[in-house]
Image: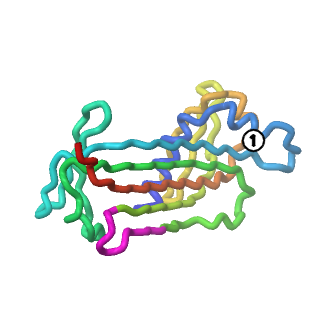
């Protein structure tokens, strides 16, 4: 199931990969070198805690543009009772996708790695979680007329991916395997509201 999610997430990301990144990765590469694409983004948001239900573990946050969102906090957040209405929550998010053409049969290191760091009991709630998943997909068809290619994922399902720059289709062929590595990290910290 996790492989399917990673494959689906990777396909969504591939739909938006910039052609400039691909061109830079392959510019000046010898024919023996395989193209590689890396796309990443980072975001930081600070929100105010406007409500907390400790019984259901639902925290309501108000974002900088006034948007309100409920978040279910897992049992692993042992310091939740220390969070108060008016506290500020800073969320930092990082996500990247690397797609690399590999020779068929190459050991790709497919799998998933994760790490979690939590605040110690008694400290203000916070922590960081990171996850990296790697899957391989095989190019089963290339449609230059429609600027797309078909990819067969690790569970045997095939999806069609639209390519932003049709010239990129000249850099791959049917049978090529893609190693897709998706990385995401989330860091959360809580600060008590400043007294007015």
SS type, badge 1: helix
Question: Residue 14's x, y, as percent?
Answer: 56, 40
At 25% across and 32% down in the image, what residue appears? 66
Image: 195 above or below 109? above
Question: Residue 68's x, y, as percent?
Answer: 22, 39
At 48% across and 67% down in the image, what residue appears? 114
Looking at the image, residue 89 sits to the left or right of residue 33; the answer is left
Q: Which residue is mark 1?
A: 25
Predominant SS along the magenta part: loop
Count of numbered tags: 1
Q: Is residue 46 magenta?
A: no
Q: Quadrant of residue 191?
A: bottom left
Which residue is outermost to the bottom?
121
Question: Residue 193's x, y, as percent?
Answer: 26, 49
Image: 103 above or below 145? below
Where does the C terminus fall, quadrant-wise? top left
Please, which colouring scheme is shown?
rainbow
At 30% across and 48% down in the image, what residue appears? 88
Question: Residue 86's x, y, as percent?
Answer: 21, 47
Looking at the image, residue 77 sits to the left or right of residue 28; the answer is left
Looking at the image, residue 89 sits to the left or right of residue 86; the answer is right
Where does the N terminus fall, quadrant-wise? bottom left
Given residues 25 and 69, the one toward you in this image is 69
How many other residues sit within 10 Å of disc 1, few (<14), some (14-19) or many (≥20)? some
Which residue is outermost to the top?
145
Given residues 110 and 67, the one toward you in this image is 67
Which residue is outermost to the front?
196
Q: Quadrant of residue 75?
A: bottom left
Q: Is residue 124 magenta?
A: yes
Given residues 88 and 28, the one toward you in this image is 88
Q: Which span is picked out in magenta?
A: 115-125
């Amino acid at each position: 199931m996790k492989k399917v999610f990673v494959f689906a997430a990777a396909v969504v990301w591939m739909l938006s990969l910039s052609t400039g990144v691909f061109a830079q990765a392959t510019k000046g590469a010898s024919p023996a070198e395989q193209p590689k694409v890396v796309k990443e983004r980072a975001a930081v948001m600070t929100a105010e805690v406007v409500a907390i239900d400790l019984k259901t573990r639902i925290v309501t946050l108000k974002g900088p543009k006034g948007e309100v969102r409920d978040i279910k906090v897992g049992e692993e957040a042992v310091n939740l009772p220390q969070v108060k209405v008016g506290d500020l929550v800073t969320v930092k998010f990082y996500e990247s996708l690397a797609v690399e053409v590999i020779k068929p049969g190459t050991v790709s290191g497919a799998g998933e790695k994760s790490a979690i760091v939590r605040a110690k009991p008694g400290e203000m709630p916070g922590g960081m979680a990171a996850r990296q998943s790697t899957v391989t997909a095989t190019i089963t068809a290339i449609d230059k007329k429609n600027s797309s290619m078909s990819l067969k994922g690790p569970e045997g399902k095939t999806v069609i991916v639209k390519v932003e720059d049709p010239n990129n289709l000249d850099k791959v062929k049917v049978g090529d395997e893609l190693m897709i590595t998706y990385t995401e990290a989330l860091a959360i910290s809580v600060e008590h509201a400043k007294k007015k």
